[in-house]
Image: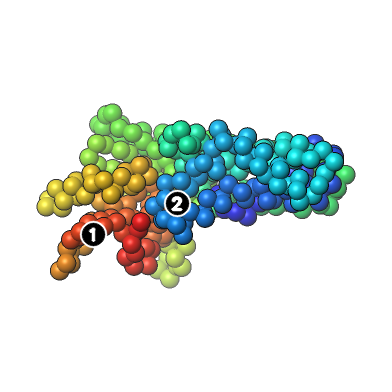
Amino acid sequence: MDNLTHTLSGLVTARLMPARELPMRTRYIAGALAANFPDLDIVLAPISSELYLMHHRGETHSLILLPLWALLLSWLFAKMFKPAGGWRDFYALTAVVLLVHIFGDWITGYGTQLFAPFTRETYSLGTTFIIDPLLTSLLLLGFIGSLWWKSTPRIAQLSAVLVIAWIGVQFYWKQDALKAGEAYASAQGWENVQISAEPRPISPFNWTVIIREPEHYHYAHLKLNADSRQPAPADANWLVRALAEFQPPTLASWQTVAKFGNGLDNALARDIWMRPKFAFFRWFASAPALYRIDHHPHGACVWFEDLRFATPGRESPFRFGLCGPDWQTYRLGRDGQVRPFH
């Protein structure tokens, strides 16, 4: 979830919490700061890009460590604002705001390490795109309304209820997307496959459905509320063209991707995939597939991507590979630039 939405969630939560011993202004400041605390894991990025990738949404997003983070923040807020009750006046507020932040990340498709550091497994409800204008707007209206009607928390309560309802709507449509994937797999006679549905921006009806076989993926961009193709005009902008890629389930264009490519590429891709230096991507990716192999005079670059992030009109943000002759780790940027990754 983006930081604006996290901040607004902290502000609305601050209005909802029964912390009468704290001035409202103090509660808002503490709520906004606590709502952004988990994303301080970004300080790892300058130290090591790989370290940041492995620990992003890790320890600072852990349900197990949440009580300790709440205690630390409460102590800091007590030093800043000096309330009569000390850190205890902030603890409940801080703990709930941190929990709301974790919830906001858990509903997206990226994955959150809820039980770090004891396990690196990630968890995701996968109902909501990382930037959701409607969800953010509901929180914004809840905060503005709370500033206007200062005597009652009902506006904030209504905002929270509407946000939960919106996530419920998204969950409902995700089930429809999964059913569309199941129907397609059944029609093809595929058995023992795994099916996932990834939320896409702009509309709760737009989903990317991925069907996983041991050696292949099949995926399509679906528009669940359409019953006919809606091609983009020839002079349409990039957004209209991108949205036109989402088609009704019965008319969707399913693409098949070999996990390790075909022909001569297959053996090299398998070799690179299993190398120790690529362990981070084996952990990170949920639908990893060979993107391409670039051949250069000094050696090849073998690139993998995660189809979980395949979105029309948008280059994948997570493409990694090893490049010869010494097979070091690199990241392929959206701009096509190759950058060391360590």
Name the residue: 30% across, 38% down.
212
Can residue 194 be seen?
A: yes
> Which residue is drawn at the image coordinates 61% and 49% (left, top)?
37
Disc 2 element: helix
Q: Secondary structure at mark 1?
A: strand
Mark 2 crowdedness (10 Å alpha carbons): few <14, some 14-19, many ≥20: some
Judging by the rendered image, the residue that carries numbered circle 1 is 323
Image disc number at residue 196: none
Residue at the image position 36 percent from the left and 36 percent from the top? 195
> Looking at the picture, which amino acid does disc 1 mark?
Cys
Task: Name the residue nearer the viewer: 126 or 330.
Answer: 330
Q: Residue at the far right: name it.
A: 151
Q: Colour mode?
A: rainbow
Whether residue 107 is visible here, answered yes or no, is no
Q: Residue 87's x, y, as percent?
A: 75, 40
Q: Position of residue 43 (x, y in %)?
A: 52, 55
Left or right, residue 306 beside residue 129: left
Residue under label 2, please give it. Answer: 52
On the image, which quarter does residue 241 sit in?
bottom left
Q: Where residue 161 sits: x, y (%)?
A: 69, 38
